[in-house]
Amino acid sequence: MKKILFTSLAAIALIAGCSSEQPAKSSEPPKTTTTPTEAPKATPASTPEATTKPSEAPQAKEGEYTAGDFKITGVSAKETAGMWVVTAKVENTGSKDVQVAMLSAVLYDKDGKRLGVAQGGIDGMKKGESKTIQFISTDKLEGYKKVEFQVDTTM
């Protein structure tokens, strides 16, 4: 039953999310659940800004991303048989086991132009467990320079 549910969710997400069309522009900035975490800028110890604010994300290493309760590392992308495959190591950093989850990777070029979306799924992941996940896209992702991850669905 889980395999059928996961396969159905994956197919729906792949069909719905693999469009290469750009979303309509609005006056509000786009809302994403994750971006690569950058080190905060150093400030002199004598200023109030020197203490870490509660809303700031913990410092992450270069090439490390977060999306919901997942830490994502080792991201690479390549074209295979006319499809693009984004491969990444995904770790469940949350406090609960995950039965199924659908994630998206949005890839951008050096100028910040959206190249496309790749989607992948997780079927059964215990808390603290890591798996290598493949995100699939029909969009042309060649020359990507930036990637953002988001959790679309989790159970």
Image: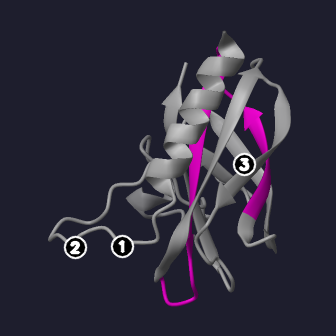
List x then y, in percent, for residue 12. Answer: 50, 39
Local secondary structure at mark 1: loop
Q: What residue is shown at x 41% (from left), y 54% (from top)?
A: 32
Does residue 58 appear anywhere in the picture?
no
The disc at residue 72 is 3
Residue range of the region highlighted in magenta in the rendering? 85-112
Q: Is residue 98 above or below residue 132?
A: above
- Horizontally, residue 87 falls left or right of residue 153, namely right
- Gap in Å between the C-alphas at discs 2 and 1? 8 Å
At label 2, the amino acid type is Lys
Q: Is residue 104 above or below residue 102?
A: below
The crowd level at tag 3 (other Cα within 10 Å; few <14, some 14-19, many 20+) is many
- Gap in Å between the C-alphas at discs 2 and 3? 28 Å
Q: Is residue 106 above or below residue 101?
A: below
The disc at residue 22 is 1
- As rendered, which of 15 and 56 lies closer to the eye? 15
The crowd level at tag 2 (other Cα within 10 Å; few <14, some 14-19, many 20+) is few
- As rendered, which of 95 and 3 lies closer to the eye? 3
Q: Residue furthest top?
A: 1
- Is 90 magenta? The answer is yes
Q: Is residue 72 above or below residue 122?
A: below
At label 3, the amino acid type is Ile
Q: What residue is shown at x 14% (from left), y 71% (from top)?
A: 27
The disc at residue 25 is 2
